[in-house]
Amino acid sequence: MKLNKIIFFFVVSMLLFSCQSSTLGLAGTKPPSHEIWDGLLKSHVKSNGLVDYKGFIKDKAKLEQYTKLLSDNAPDRKTWTKEQQLAYWINAYNAFTVKLIVDNYPVKSIRDLGPKFKIPMLKDVWHYKFFKIGGVDSSLDEIEHSILRKEFDEPRIHFAVNCASISCPPLLNEAYTAEKIESQLQKVTTNFINDQNQNKIAPDNAQISSIFLWFKGDFTKKGTLIDFLNTYAKVKIKSTAKISHKDYNWNLNE
């Protein structure tokens, strides 16, 4: 009973910590070039988002060169533009996710990785601090929830970050850049919502990704979920439509 209480309070404290604002960042840095990452994506990611992890393994030195560049050049919140920061954090999430798979390949699912001591209610692998940002031990959870979701009023990030799984929005085969971030977010959001493998949309019935269930609050700040979907969907959904959610396939996206 005592052990259960300890685990409970640990879980609660970890969940609260993940919701706090992140302190990741460095003063006086300049946005790094994403050219290396762009080249790797063009070489090892198909247009449909499937990833050639064996190809990334062959280019592991370049991947590690890029992730080190990210680690050493965390955003300066005061001098970097919003677009520069957004591109950095999306690329960081995706690059470190790929590195996690590469370092543990072969693996059936990203969910099989993470700390050996697993705690209920935590998404373990996403809380696993396996890289550094500005000298601080960091996790994918912190980038996604404490930075991208908390600091940017941008629901489209959910279609830009990739969790190395079949049901996750496809990994874009080019790096995100400050100059192109708006068109890139528009592209990946439109593509995902209209992808029949991810969402089956009809006027009276829409079977959609579980992403829209898990993060519904992010998509409904300026209207209903159907309003958000209809902004990008080619087939418009009626306000009275029946909405259901598809099962999530966590198998590796290769």
Image: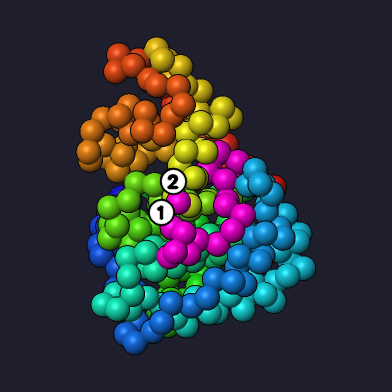
Name the element at disc 2: helix
Q: Is residue 211 magenta?
A: no
Name the residue located 44 percent from the left edge and 46 percent from the top edge.
186
**One can see residue 103 in this view:** no
Q: Nearer the viewer, residue 164 or 32?
A: 32
- Which quarter of the figure has residue 179? bottom left
Q: Are marks 1 and 2 in contact (CB under 8 Å)?
A: yes
Q: Which residue is mark 2?
A: 186
Q: Is residue 169 magenta?
A: yes
Identified by mark 2, the residue type is Gln
Name the residue located 49 percent from the left edge and 45 percent from the top edge.
187
- Which quarter of the figure has residue 54? bottom right
Which disc is residue 182 wearing? Answer: 1
Residue 61 is situated, as x and y percent measured from the top left of the image, at: 69, 76
Q: From the viewer's perspective, tell me whether residue 115 is left or right of residue 156.
A: right
Q: Nearer the viewer, residue 153 or 164?
A: 153
Q: Nearer the viewer, residue 153 or 108?
A: 153
Residue 128 is situated, as x and y percent measured from the top left of the image, at: 47, 63
Name the element at disc 1: helix
Name the residue located 29 percent from the left edge and 18 percent from the top edge.
239
Q: Residues within 10 Å of mark 2 (few under 14, many from 20)?
A: some
Q: From the viewer's perspective, tell me whether residue 57 is left or right of residue 168.
A: right
Identified by mark 1, the residue type is Glu
**One can see residue 227 in this view:** yes
Q: Which residues are magenta?
A: 165-183
